[in-house]
Image (cartoon, rainbow, N blue to C red):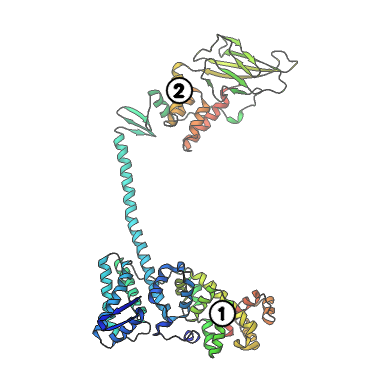
Amino acid sequence: MRLEYNLLGATALQDDRGNMNVLAQRARTGESQAMEALLTECRTRLQRYFAARARNTDDCEDLIQEVLLRVANALPRTELNAPFDHWLYRIAANCLTSYYSRVYRQREMAFTQLSDPESVANLQQDSFEASLVSRIAEEQAQAALREVVQAVCSDAERRVIWMHAQHETIESIAQMLQMKPATVRSHLMRGRAKVLAYLIQYRREWLGGAEAIQAAIEALERDGGESLSEAERRALSDPKPNQTDLRRAALKLAKYLYP
Amino acid sequence: MPAAIVMAQRNPNDDRTHLDAEQILELVERGRRHKRYDEYIDHIAECAVCRETYKQLLLAESAGRAARRQRTVIALRFLLPAAAAAMLILFFGARALLSSGSETAGLREMNGVWYEGATRLPDWALAAATQFERPPAPTRDASAETPRAVRLIRPNPANAAVESLTPDFQWEPVPDAVRYRVRLERADGSHALNLKVDGERATLPEDERLEAGVSYRLTIEALAAEELAGDGLKTVYEFRTLTPDEQQQLRWARENRMQAPRACAVIFYRLGFYADALETLDEMPNEPIVQQWREIIQSSITSATVE
């Protein structure tokens, strides 16, 4: 969609979103006309957003006013760390959530209701992938790791792994991907097992070589964790195309490979 | 932050690398049904800026859904009891309107007239319906039944009475029997006659008819080739005929068995039409009282005829 802003004397048609960003930049510097034009454009978008969500037109108008007020107050003193339209919609979503809780007299909701909070809490420890990423400092190696994930994981596993690597919680990922937390957990574990098995088989040097793997086995035994079966040991020393045992072993060793 | 390293280098303010907020909103609204779901969600998985916007929009959306759901539950919490109360008032109100008198065990009285359901009960039917709540003791243990040599098919041997005064008797063939002899006599022995036999059927002689309201004894004798009369296998059935009043009651009960099952079941029982009584009970809810009546009638069937 393209709009024309005669108010600013801008005769050229500009990309709607780009125009909003430009207007926002100018409004931040104190241009009142730019602020007015920006708020007009915001109103159109907010009208669409709230009309379908507020209980009635009065509430809709109140919500729009509230958001516009926040934008007008905050914009001059805010360093935007996202495109303006994202910032606008985040404020709108925030107002809407408060509105729901206020109007329906409902307490703030948890992001999701976890079916198995304990298991999820365990998984919310430091992400193995994040740890791995931080240790592979070279950009080239990071790109290679990205390729590995892309190659060995399913779409769902890949998405879960990336989000988790960026410190998203299991419940947050579940909400975003419209899955149950337990399903997210399964994808994460399965994807992680696949990546680790691949690294053990083809990129041992990324994990510190055979010595590091042996050290991880010893650490596992020392800790009294679930020990490796004979088949899993064989798979570690001599990986075969069928990675079932190797993946199982990789999962058991995961936390010892990068203590 | 590792993600910032591993992911494509993105400038948060460079909107060319991000989804439009409205595109994200569209994804929130349509979810997996969005035709570009995979493309958008792949981007969101890697882009922290878009993901943050996506999360906040999702949060608002789920808050809205939860609020609406709660509102519905609250509405139902008030509406359902109100609806239930209204139904009860309606139900009892209608009953009160229909009935200005007393009511007991499925029967109700209005202006001196008794009804079972919507069926008006004659006095004799009312007495029967009242008896339904007080079943008699079983007459005989059903397990004591002995097998019969000749099994009557018609009239229904389960019944202790026959409707017709010119009955047609029919029985199952008996192995080895080459002929049958059928004798009918009054239970008091005052009058006897031999029936006309044709194969496994027997009828009264022409110009003969049974007397109403009288008990009879029917003897069927199956004779093998060399057997003489009196030496064959005999089976005796006892039955009685109905009086004109009883005939009327039977007709009424057959017409109203679905509408007034309590009264009709007892009438059938009293008349000795046990098969009809059982059929009527089978249409009723399997309550303890119905089960009790079923046992009584079963025992009456076995004791209705004796060998």
Mark seen at residue B251: 2
> Image check: A165 left or right of B95?
right
Report x, y in % for residue B56: 38, 75
Secondary structure beneath label 1: helix
Kindly indicate whether the residues beneath marks 2 and 1 are on one polypeptide chain. Answer: no
Q: CA distance from mark 2 to mark 1?
A: 86 Å
Farthest residue toward the right? B226
Q: Which subunit holds the residue at mark 2? A: B
Residue holding disc 1:
A149
Amino acid type for the residue under numbered disc 2: Arg
Residue that extends furthest to the bottom in the rendered view of this protein: A138
Q: Residue furthest front?
A: A11
Left or right for A4, reference B240? left
Is B76 above or below relative to B262? below
Place of residue A130 in the rendered image (x, y in percent of width and height, measured from the top left): 51, 83
Q: Which secondary structure lies at badge 2? A: helix
Residue B101 in view, yes or no? yes
In the rendered image of this protein, does residue B223 appear above or below residue A32? above
Quarter occupied by residue B259: top left
In x, y percent, where is residue B297?
Answer: 52, 29
